[in-house]
Amino acid sequence: MAKQVHYNSAEHIAAETAADPYLRPAFAASDRARRFLWNACRAILYRPSPRAMFAWRAFLLRCFGATMGPNCHFYPSSRVWAPWNLECADGVCAGEGAEIYNPAPMRLGSHAILSQEAYLCGATHDTDDPRFPLLAYAMEVGAYAWVCARASVAPGVSVGEGAVLGMGSVATRDMEPWGIYAGVPAVKVKERKRPASAG
């Protein structure tokens, strides 16, 4: 499936904001203010919370607009760029240092796992446009998918149901359901057995 841009900063930020396009903000002032408040909340209430207080951190994410299913386990040093663009089904896990950069909507399916320092990157820049605008993509990580430690998913890439991205790998293309991928860029190396619990 071809990637579709969800947000292009050149279409939303007026040229008058700065003569140098590289100095223009990528988002409106209201969005930047909302992120400031969220980052303050994260620093004061989310990050210092005890490791086992998963329900508390899910509550904080919900307060800022995230949709969080039951039993989501987001660890204290996990990072969510924009909670209002996050939708999690039940049992989603974001390990220590996992980062969700989601300027556009991002959905994680039931029992999806982001291991330590995994990175979901939801935006890039248009290198062919002299204004160098930010381009953000809606993304999805399927149910029972696993993004292993220090693995990265590039902007606009979909992680299929049950797919696995091996440790330190970089997914630059959509990952098929129940495939196991490894390498930079990641390639499919084998099929994963579908567990009975996945229906």
Image (spheres, rainbow, N blue to C red):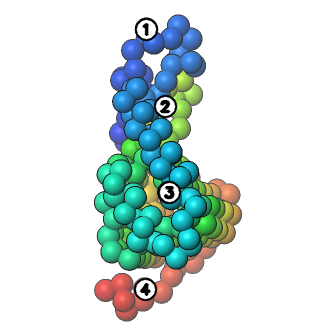
- The residue singled out by tag 3 in the image is 45
Counting from the top left corner in percent of width and height, residue 33 is at 42, 33
| Disc sitting over residue 134 in the figure | 2
In this rendering, which labeled residue sits more in front, label 2 or label 1?
1
Residue count near mark 3 (Cα–Cα under 10 Å), binned few <14, some 14–19, many ≥20 = some
Q: Label 2, label 3: how many angstroms apart (C-alpha)? A: 30 Å
Q: Nearer the viewer, residue 65 or 166?
A: 65
Residue count near mark 1 (Cα–Cα under 10 Å), binned few <14, some 14–19, many ≥20 = few
| Disc sitting over residue 16 in the figure | 1
Regarding residue 151, the answer to whether it shows in the image is no
Residue count near mark 4 (Cα–Cα under 10 Å), binned few <14, some 14–19, many ≥20 = some
Secondary structure at badge 4 equals loop
Q: Are marks 3 and 4 in contact (CB under 8 Å)?
A: no
Amino acid type at image mark 1 = Glu
Secondary structure at badge 1 equals helix
Secondary structure at badge 2 equals strand
Q: Considering only order in the chain, which callout, 1 or 3, is on the residue closer to the N terminus?
A: 1
Q: Nearer the viewer, residue 94 or 158?
A: 94
Q: Label 2, label 1: how many angstroms apart (C-alpha)? A: 17 Å
Secondary structure at badge 3 equals helix
Q: Label 3, label 4: how many angstroms apart (C-alpha)? A: 38 Å
